[in-house]
Image (cartoon, rainbow, N blue to C red):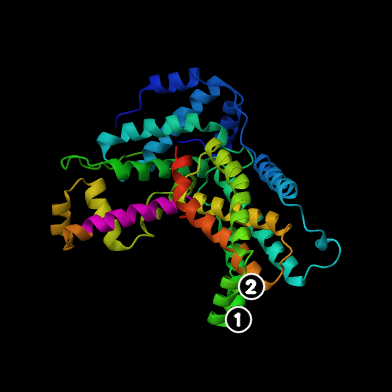
Amino acid sequence: MIADEKEMAAMMAAAQKGDAGTYRALLAEVQLWLERFYRKRVAPAQLDDLVQEVMMAVHAKRATWDPTRAFYPWLAAIARYRWVDHLRKVYRSAEDELADYDAPEDSEEEAVMARMSLERLFVHLPEKQSEVIELVKIEGLSIAEASKKTGQSESLVKVNIHRGLKKLSALVEKAE
Amino acid sequence: MNRVPNSLIDTLASDLEPVQPIRLWHGIALVALSAVATVILVELLDGLWHGIVQGRASGIFFIANGMFAIVGAAAALAVVRMASPSVGNSQEGARWSAGMLALLPISAGLMLGVGGLFSAISNDVYGLDCFLAGTGFGLVTAAALVLWLRRGAPVSLSAAGTLTGLAAGAIGSFAYGLACPIDTIEHLAIWHTAPVALLAVVGRYAIPPLVRW
């Protein structure tokens, strides 16, 4: 089970004061949380790299968490931001499949995570955009394959990916 | 599932130094200081208009400059908050206040009509000076907010850029407005509002590369 908001906020406040032991525990929790956060939306082969990248971002930007505000929405905003960046860059091989990570579930924790999940971003996109982003950027299909599968022309697939990613980046803090 | 190597956690933990967490009021103080510095700069370079305290300013002078101040404050506050990212952060207040500012050119347009507006633009010999001055003085606030964002972790870069430009233009126009004795609605609605629109557009494209992380 991942630590709740109150515990995470207390650990982060201690980390900002330089408590390395607590920080180690916090990072372990952050790692677990990120793995669950990204499941189904990041190819397994890229998951570790993305989680590491976000953990380094959390470290570099730890001063930007305001102790008077909640911790998880801060972490989720950084995780979403890095994820959209990741989608821009990634063209993964088609054979990698997304795994259903069988993480332990906890109702309160699930509710918090669901509110800030990546799915919440996708629901704000028109279907033609989310569909091609999912196919090309997450499942790893080529533009031609995605075009064939969706019936959109290749240029339309590219345009919809471009517009969809632009919209996703504008939704990082908004969609909840 | 593969796990992130613990060596990363060890490395990050061993690199840990105490940090001063970002505080909203630090950002607000920075914006307030930059606004005061802008007004002082206006006084030093152009001299504030004494007609304001001598009762010679029109009602629209106070309304328009009050609107610039409110838009500047709302947009700057939104930018200050954006340095500390959070799902649920909203910039609605700044957007609505920008909409409120659009009342000035809309009102001028309705009062004067297209021909009258064109005539007001072409006959106002001081208009361009006000436009350039408002834009130039806005750069003080723009610089302060960019520094603040670079210290933070903004995740909505386009919005951060647009709102930074909006705040800069509004505060620049407000500060220079205190030195400008032309207090007609057409002058204020065109030449004092234009820096706000210009800097918002420039900020939308120029600021994201400066604050990306």
Position of residue A152 measured from the top left corner of the image (x, y, whole percent): 18, 62
Q: Chain of mark 2?
A: B
Q: Is residue A31 above or below residue A133?
A: above
Q: CA distance from mark 1 to mark 2?
A: 8 Å
Q: Residue at x 60, y 50 (%)?
A: B136
Residue under label 2, please give it. B186
Circle 1 sits in a helix, a strand or a loop, which is it?
helix
Label 2 Cα crowd, 10 Å radius (few <14 / some 14-19 / many 20+): many
Q: Residue at x 46, y 32 (%)?
A: A29
Q: Which residues are magenta?
A: A157-173
Decide if residue B132 is in sight here: yes
* Quadrant placement of the C terminus of chain B: top left
Decide if residue A131 is in sight here: no
Residue under label 1, please give it. B112
Position of residue B138 measured from the top left corner of the image (x, y, whole percent): 61, 50
Check residue B40 in the rendering and tell me which mark sits there, or answer none.
Answer: none
Position of residue B20 measured from the top left corner of the image (x, y, whole percent): 63, 29
Q: How many marks?
A: 2
